[in-house]
């Protein structure tokens, strides 16, 4: 008798070959048989008229903190995601000395928009080293995790305050190399760095003070393990993006390592720039480099309130500084005082077209409920003021508890985005799962891929889309035993209805430690999600206690490695 049998499914095995009808038997956490299974299973799943595929892999997330209180990475798991990569953008929660904890929390708050209160009330700081952090998140882990090492925290550990002031000297670089090796031995999947991000004081994060010699030295360590380097380039400038792409390509060729950069967006005003970037990607692959651009599936939507410093205002320094550094009362005063308000209005008036199409999505008071769902242009007309003044007035009246949304700001040209996603050298990712929790919902990108680009637009096939987010991702990141439905591999499996799979609407929930809120999306059309051979979530049962998540790749025992050598 098998532990689990999935019967009568339409198997899309992740290889890209056409779907076929078969049963799948699982024993001891691995796929034991694919074909006609006569034997019974202790548990059986009827997959008639449904697709059976490898579990989806999300390579760009920031679940580092959430995993400390939620080993399921909810709701990502319910969308069929069985493996996430955390620690992107130079930020990981380890290795981290106690004296640097609040510095890192400040960076997470600024860059990934994670609430300070969630760290205060949801995190028990009982680790410093990378192995200690991995041991900590493994408790109750239901989803697989590939954990990157953040370049910024490597620098903090070795250089202290100097990490945020200067380049490293040769001795410090050697210490960073040693520390990176310790992390890779413990099970780190690679290294992440950033060339754009700012800390909570709006100064460059530590990784941005590194010179080319430092990055080269760390890439040489990655080469010893064949691990990946992830970067955030200056994505707002195509020339700088291409320069970083070339830098990655040289490191990839020199050290025979995979590299990836994210994000890469395509919109009406940058189609030519994206085509230039992709042409250079093709050139570098032709040279033998592996430099994978990451592209997300969903359009860009941004939600915000005046209570949280949104990246939407980053190009308005007066607005951003008020929201970033002011208390609630100070923000209200800045927008209520006639003199300061006039300056803020003048600064933002050139973007009236943007403010006009924003939509009010949530207020607390009964008086302003009549405006919910309307654009600021409509609200302004109803109140006899400009859209910009309408936004300020409602925010002040609600004591900043007014939430707005800017919809379809970019990455919304279906043919161009679909063409990018289909490109053989484009890596589907950049979901940012676990971050920006009040700016946009980072869940359901896979459902949107199948629902919008496969079923509705017909721009990709089911088989190639599954391959893109399973075996391709596993191969790029060196994730072992996953990404394919093959005998002997780990049974990470998702069962879904190809005619129904999609993402739900954004909903506002309060489930973040410290009474915090976020936007999420429910899964549509996903039937069952299996991790390590155990049913972790199903539409019928919800999340289960059968937690079988693992750290990927597994740790290396340096002693055994030396003995073997």
Image (spheres, helix red, strand yellow):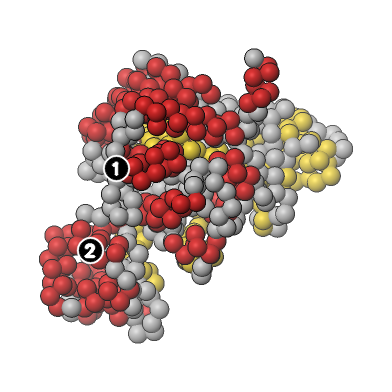
Q: Quadrant of the N terminus?
A: top right
| Residue situated in front as seen by the camera: 375 or 169 | 169
The dot on residue 302 is none
Vertical placement of residue 334 versus 206, above or below? below
The dot on residue 319 is 2
Q: Quadrant of the C terminus?
A: top right
The dot on residue 165 is 1
Nearer-N-terminus badge (2/1): 1
Name the residue located 21 percent from the left edge and 78 percent from the top edge.
336
State the image coordinates of residue 440 (x, y, percent, origin top left): 41, 57
Vertical placement of residue 219 versus 391, above or below? above
Vertical placement of residue 257 versus 69, above or below? above
User: Which of the 4 image quarters holds residue 387?
Assistant: bottom left
Name the residue located 80 percent from the left edge and 46 percent from the top edge.
43
User: Which of the 4 image quarters holds residue 234?
Assistant: top left
- 2 or 1: mark nearer the eye: 1
Q: Few, some or many C-alpha atoms within 10 Å of disc 2 (few <14, some 14-19, many ≥20)? A: many
User: Which of the 4 image quarters holds residue 297?
Assistant: top left
Q: Are marks 2 and 1 in contact (CB under 8 Å)?
A: no
Name the residue located 24 percent from the left edge and 33 percent from the top edge.
240
On the question of residue 266 being in view, the answer is no
Vertical placement of residue 515 versus 521, above or below? below
Secondary structure beneath label 2: helix
On the question of residue 336 being in view, the answer is yes
């Amino acid at each position: 008798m098998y532990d689990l049998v999935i019967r009568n499914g339409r198997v899309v095995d992740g290889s890209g070959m056409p779907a076929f009808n078969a049963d799948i038997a699982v024993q001891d956490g691995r796929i034991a048989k694919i074909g006609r299974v006569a034997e019974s299973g202790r548990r059986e799943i009827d997959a008639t008229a449904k697709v059976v595929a490898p579990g989806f892999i999300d390579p760009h997330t920031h679940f580092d903190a959430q995993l400390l209180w939620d080993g399921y990475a909810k709701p990502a798991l319910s969308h069929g995601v069985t493996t996430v990569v955390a620690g992107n953008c130079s930020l990981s929660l380890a290795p981290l000395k106690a004296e640097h904890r609040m510095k890192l929390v400040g960076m997470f708050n600024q860059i990934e928009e994670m609430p300070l209160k969630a760290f205060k009330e949801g995190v028990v700081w009982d680790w410093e080293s990378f192995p200690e952090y991995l041991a900590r998140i493994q408790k109750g882990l239901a989803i697989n995790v590939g954990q990157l090492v953040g370049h910024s925290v490597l620098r903090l550990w070795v250089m202290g305050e100097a990490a945020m002031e200067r380049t490293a000297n040769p001795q410090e670089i050697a210490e960073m190399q040693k520390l990176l090796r310790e992390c890779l031995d413990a099970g780190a999947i690679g290294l992440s760095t950033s060339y754009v991000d700012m800390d909570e004081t709006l100064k460059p994060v530590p990784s941005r003070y590194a010179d080319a010699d430092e990055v080269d030295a760390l890439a040489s360590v990655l080469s010893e393990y064949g691990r990946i380097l992830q970067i955030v380039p200056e994505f707002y400038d195509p020339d700088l993006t291409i320069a970083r792409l070339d830098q990655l390509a040289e490191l990839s060729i020199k050290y025979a390592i995979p590299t990836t950069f994210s994000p890469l967006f395509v919109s009406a005003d940058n189609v030519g720039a994206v085509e230039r970037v992709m042409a250079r990607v093709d050139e570098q692959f032709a040279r033998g480099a592996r430099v994978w651009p990451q592209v997300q599936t969903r359009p860009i939507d941004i939600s915000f309130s005046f209570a949280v410093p949104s990246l939407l205002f980053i190009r308005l320094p007066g607005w951003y500084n008020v929201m970033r550094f002011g208390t609630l009362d100070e923000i209200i005063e800045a927008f209520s005082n006639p003199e300061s308000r006039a300056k803020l209005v003048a600064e933002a008036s050139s973007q009236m077209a943007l403010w006009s199409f924003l939509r009010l999505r949530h207020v607390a008071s009964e008086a302003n409920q009549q405006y919910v769902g309307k654009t600021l242009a409509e609200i302004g007309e109803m109140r006899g003021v400009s859209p910009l003044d309408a936004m300020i007035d409602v925010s002040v009246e609600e004591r900043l508890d007014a939430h707005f949304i800017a919809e379809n700001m970019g990455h919304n040209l279906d043919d161009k985005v679909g063409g990018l996603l289909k490109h053989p050298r484009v890596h589907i990712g950049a979901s940012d799962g676990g971050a920006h929790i009040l700016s946009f919902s980072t869940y359901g990108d896979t459902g949107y891929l199948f629902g919008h680009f496969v079923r509705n637009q017909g721009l990709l096939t089911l088989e190639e889309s599954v391959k893109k987010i399973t075996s391709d991702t596993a191969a790029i990141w060196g994730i072992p035993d996953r990404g394919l439905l093959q005998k002997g591999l780990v049974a990470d499996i998702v069962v879904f209805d190809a005619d129904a799979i999609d993402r739900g609407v954004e909903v506002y929930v309060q489930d973040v430690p410290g009474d915090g809120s976020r936007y999420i999306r429910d899964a549509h059309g996903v039937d069952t999600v299996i991790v390590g051979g155990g049913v972790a979530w199903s539409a019928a049962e919800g999340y289960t206690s059968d937690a079988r998540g693992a750290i990927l790749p597994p740790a290396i025992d340096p002693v055994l490695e030396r003995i073997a050598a």
